[in-house]
Structures are given as C-alpha cells and as structure tokens.
Amino acid sequence: MTIPKYECTDCMKNFLKELPKCEHHVHLEGTLEPNLLFKLAERNNIILPSTFPTTVEECNIRYNNFGDLQDFLDHYYIGMSVLITEQDFYDLAMAYFQKACEDGCLHSEVFFDPQGHLERNIDLETVVAGFDKACKDANKKFGTTNKLIMCLLRHLPNSDGLKVLRDSKKYYQNGTIHGLGLDSSEKPFPPQLFEDCYNLIRTEFPNVGLTAHAGEEGDYTYVENSLNLLNVTRIDHGINSKQSSELMEKLYQNKTMLTICPLSNVKLQCVKDVAELPIPLFFDKGIPFSINSDDPAYFGGYILDNYIVVHERFGFSVEQWKTISLNGINGSWCDESRKQELRDKVDEVCNKYLELV
Ligand code: HPA
Ligand code: ZN
C-alpha cells in the first residue's frame, strides 16, 4: 500500500462527511456484509459451498485477495445465494441506506442484478418489492432520495436479458425502476452484444437512465462502444478512457459522467494504488466523475472511505471538492428541484469549511 501523500486531517474528514454526496455506482448485492450473509444463510437454511469462507474473519482474508474481477464475481454470486425472501432484500438495502446516510450520502442510485436471483427461482416481484420498499422507507427515515437501476449480467445471453426486460416493463412504466445498467465479466462480453436490450428500453421508455460498466478491465473501446451503440449517458468505472484523448474530448463535450470506484479498482487489481487512477487527469480535462463504493462489503469501504482515500492521494482543495460534489449532483437522475436542494447544501457546507481546512 502506498503511503498517503496528503494528510486527511480530522477537519478535512468532517468536511468530506458533511459534503453532500451522491452515489451512482453501488451494487446492493455488493453491500452484503459477512455478518448479514451468515445470518441470512442460517435464517434460510442455505448451505454454502465448502470452498466459501465460514467466518467473518475468513471472509475478510478472502476479500483482501481477489485476483481480478472474475475471481470476485465468483464469490459475489455465491454470497447473494442467501437472499431468498422480500424481507432479506429489504434488510440488505436498508442496511446500505443507513450506512450511506451516516456517510453523508444524500442521494443514491443503486444497482441490482435480477438475473442473479431469477436463476435461483426467486421471483422478480420478491426482489423488486423488497428493494423498492427499502428505497421508500429510507426516504422517510433518513430523508435521502434513492433510485433503482436494474443491471443485466453480461455473461448471460442477450436473449435472457431481453426476457427480464420484458418482464420488468411494468416497473419501468410505474417508475419503480429508474435505470438500466450492464455489469459482470467485462472483457469477454463487449457492449455490442446488448444493443437489442438497450434499444428495447430506450424506444419504449425514453426517460429511463442508461448506463453500463465499461473500461474497468476492458480497454477504451468498451467505453466508446457503450456510448455509440448502447446510447448510454453515463459510464460506470470508465478509467481506461484515459487511453484515448479523442474519447476524453467526447466525454468532456457531452458531459458524460464516469462513476469511479477507487477502492474497488485496487481490490480487483485494476491498479496497485488509488494514486495511479487518472482522477486528476479527468478533473483537469473537465470530465465529470463521481466517487463511489461499488461493492463496499467486499472492497473495504463505503462512499466516505473512498472520498478519504482520494483525498489522501490527491489532496484536493475545498473548491475542488465542491466541483466534484456538484458534478455528481448534476449527473444524477433526480429531478431539478432535488438537485437544487443538494446544490444549496453544498454551498452551505463549503462556505462553512472554506476558512477552516
Ligand atoms: N464490475 C462488474 N460487475 C460487477 C461489479 C464490478 O465491479 N460488481 C458487481 N458486479
Ligand atoms: Zn460495479
């Protein structure tokens, strides 16, 4: 681990905590803490494979040694097998919303992987109802706003994705699900395989937000093809966009937000240290990005931990953090009045800390 270059003082930590944050890249199934995982396994009489860790301590060791994205995913799909009832999905999401609120995250757009549950014979309605109820209850309890983004698993055939989308139309229609994303093993499954799926949603629900994981392990062409063929307006990860100055210019011109996940990139060995991430490059080029936790139960930190490690590596000023926070708000899929509310809070917090840090 590289030694932090900049100190994140207690005052700076308080600032980063109070700074209104939006999270755009967190997989609800990736917020399954080992404690809850083992509790649900017991509650549901699930016997985990013998290769799976059996204690919280064993989990923590395993989670510090993922070889790459696929190695993590193999574990992640086994982990989610303990989720069975609507209450399980609700408990999982509520635990995340509470943690996010404690971290000063005021708006979350959260991913979930329905196919990871359907293939275990869990009904779509069970999954969506549990997550939707948690979004609403978190709003009442914590005052945070939350939106669901359904992701397609790219290792499954596009026909499977089309079927799930057809079955999900009612949720897009009534606003329960707000976005479409694409996740799982990137390199063997490029974005062009999913053109039909994105077309289906775009033509029928033009207001639905479109995003896709791209440029995490795949090269910059995965980002280009997601923009050109899937018509996404946001890119999840996108760190390999730095390989093409032409692409970076396009991201800048179109104000396409990258949802960057610093601790995830280290844990999945995309980079050796957060210091290697092209965050200052994107900042200087005016490419909007947000800072996110991805799968916080597996990667050792929630949103605030990710903000702190970015500060320790790059030492941004209050003004620079203000720009990052505002870019995250502007790139969110909440309505204009909520965005203005969040911008006003950013002003308030930045004015308070401008003289202090
Ligand atoms: N990348 C791709 N798919 C995923 C991830 C990720 O980091 N987390 C959960 N599914
Ligand atoms: Zn992700």
Image: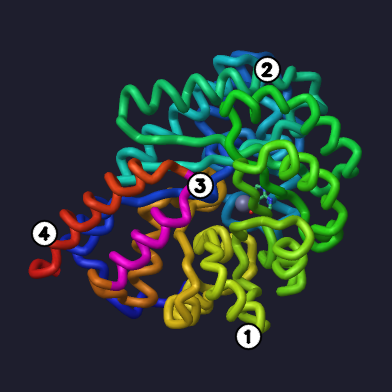
| Amino acid type at image mark 1 | Ser
Label 1, ligand 1: CB separation under 8 Å: no
Tell me where residue 82 appears, x and y as whole percent.
66, 25
> Of callouts 1 and 4, which one flags the residue occurring earlier in the amino acid sequence?
1
> Of callouts 1 and 3, which one flags the residue occurring earlier in the amino acid sequence?
1
Report, in whole angstroms, how far the alpha carbon at label 4 lies from the one at label 3: 29 Å
Give the SS element for disc 1.
helix
Q: Nearer the viewer, residue 154 or 200?
A: 200
> Of callouts 3 and 2, which one flags the residue occurring earlier in the amino acid sequence?
2
Q: Nearer the viewer, residue 269 or 145?
A: 145
Q: Is residue 14 above or below residue 180?
A: below
Please indicate whether residue 29 sits to the left or right of residue 276 in the image.
right
Residue occupying image coordinates x 60% and y 62%: 237
Residue occupying image coordinates x 73% and y 61%: 226
Please indicate whether residue 325 sits to the left or right of residue 162 in the image.
left
Tell me where residue 9 appears, x and y as whole percent.
20, 66
Looking at this view, name the residue that lies furthest to the bottom.
Answer: 245
Label 4, ligand 2: CB separation under 8 Å: no
